[in-house]
Amino acid sequence: VLLRPELEDLRVIGMNLGRVLEGLSLWMLPSFALALILGEWNAASALAVGIGSAALLGRLAVWRLATSRPLTLGLGSVVVALAWLVGAVVMALPIHLSGHTGRFLDAWFEAMSGLTATGLTLVQDVDHLAYSINLHRHLLMLLGGTGVVIVVLALLSAGGGVGALYRAEGREDRILPNVVRTARFIFVVAGVYLVLGTTALTLAMWHAGITGWRGAFHALTLFLSAFDTGGFAPTSQSLVYYHSGFVELIVVVLLIVGATSFLLHRELWVGRARELRQNLEFRAFALTLTLGTLVGMVALTVGGTFRDTTALLRQGAFTMLSAHTGGGFTVTTGNAFLTDWGQAAPFVMVVLMALGGMAGSTAGGIKLIRVALVVKGLVHDVRRLLAPPAALVVTTFHVRRRNVLTSGLLRSAAVVLLLYVATYLVGALVGLAYGRWTLSETLFESVSAAANAGLSVGITAPGMPAGLQLTYLLQMWVGRLEFIAVFTLLGFGVSIVRGRR
Amino acid sequence: VARQRDPERRLDALSVAGGVGWMLAVSGIAVVVALALAAAVALAVRLLAG
């Protein structure tokens, strides 16, 4: 029997959504402060509208809908799914008011791309965007890469039921027994790498000739983008703008750090370095990255795109890493993937983007733990078939500790894997329906959106069809939330209409 | 060992530096492997092309 939600359930959802909006209003304050310091008055007023809207809506919801009813996992999932949709609308306000987007949908797309750390962009004339709005775009990636709820938890220490919100955001593992302390640990990891990464990138910028505070600003924004495996850049030419091997090298380190799960970071930070050797997902990441880079470089060499080692490394290997971690940075000019890279190398990139990074990291995609578990399940079935009938076949895997591969774990990994594949295909089909692009082009762009990667073959551009834009926006949303929260929201909607009491 | 297993163990600067060091080492290995692969692929294709 489908139960219709009670009025109190709606109050719980509204109140918690209000809390998240209050947190989002605080998140825009650094960009607002920068606008005031630099005298960017138009940007300051645009950010003020965003801050005011989020704070007002949030406070109103918390005030009018206050309730003591606890937040269940189901209602928490509805809150999280709505928070990412509504949060992106609120965060889109300053971007739209800056005048650098066409319709409001472009700004909403941009904000969703930032929040989900995807990196596809529709902002026009990025090179002349106000510094504060550029910072706002990049801070969105830190917010989404670490997790909207994580950040709100760390900032506001929200009350009861926070565990439900945490789990609903696609983070199954608690790194520490307490959710708020887990959120703070993730924040501390981001903070440590923020200091180290921004310092290293600032020095590299100064070396590349981008001097003074402008170099530091580029360093900060690139850090936010790289650590969160996002892909936005403060210029329209991504990393090509800098012509710097040092910048590329530091970005490589940050992409690998970002695509590594916070759980593994915790293990390393408490001195359990052997986890690197034992962790199933990290081993899978090392294997797929090595194989993907090798196959991609062979394709590029055989196809005649590159012949020398330096170009293969700085463009070929970098782009494969950028695809696999969901970084989305490019070191090629124009539409090189379409015109110069042949068919095989972009296909390898599609596969790497689809796989994604490690679960519980800032990366998107299917996640390697799911792929590894499905492969282990296949091997388990073969072993069981070959074993004597009375034999008990047990398959284990190491993630933090030795775990037994149960049918429940395998089923949930396989279901989410299939849902990702279905989402990739649906997006490709919608693109094909417009009749302007080939299957390989629409598949590339669709996978890039749903896996929150951000590489583009040029379909995502100002003036693109609104229907396709909305499709990619929804793909970024469901891909980042890993389906369950979104399906719970849909189920909640159905129960309002068809449920009984 | 008991201290290491404590899930709520407080972090100090040394352990954080150790964790960051391990990530730098992993990244360094990834770059060296990529360089070796790029050199091997370029060489192999050159040799095969005569």
Image (cartoon, coloured by chain):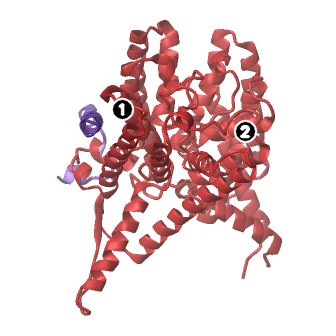
The x and y percentages for residue A242 are 47, 17
Q: What hue does chain B carry in this figure? A: purple
Residue at 39%, 16% in the rendered image: A204
Q: Colour of chain A?
A: red
Identify whether B15 is placed above or below A3.
Answer: above
* Image x and y of residue B7, in percent: 31, 52
Height in image: A288 above or below A126? below
Q: Is residue A196 left or right of residue A147?
A: left
Judging depth in this view, the residue of B38 and B31 nearest the camera is B38
Q: Nearer the viewer, residue B10 or A322?
A: A322
Report the front residue among A229 and A444: A444
Helix, strand or loop status at disc 1: helix
- Residue A108 shows up from this direction: yes
Instruction: Report which quarter residue A406 is drawn in.
Output: bottom left
Q: Is residue A79 left or right of residue A65?
A: left
Mark 2, residue position: A108
Question: Three-letter amino acid code at disc 1?
Answer: Leu
Disc 2 element: helix
The type of residue carrying mark 2 is Trp
Quarter of the picture containing the C terminus of chain A is bottom right
User: Which quadrant does the N terminus of chain A fall into?
Assistant: bottom right
Return the residue nearer the eye: B27 or A467.
A467
- The tag on residue A312 is 1
Host chain of mark 1: A
Question: Mark 2 or mark 1: which comes first in sequence?
Answer: 2
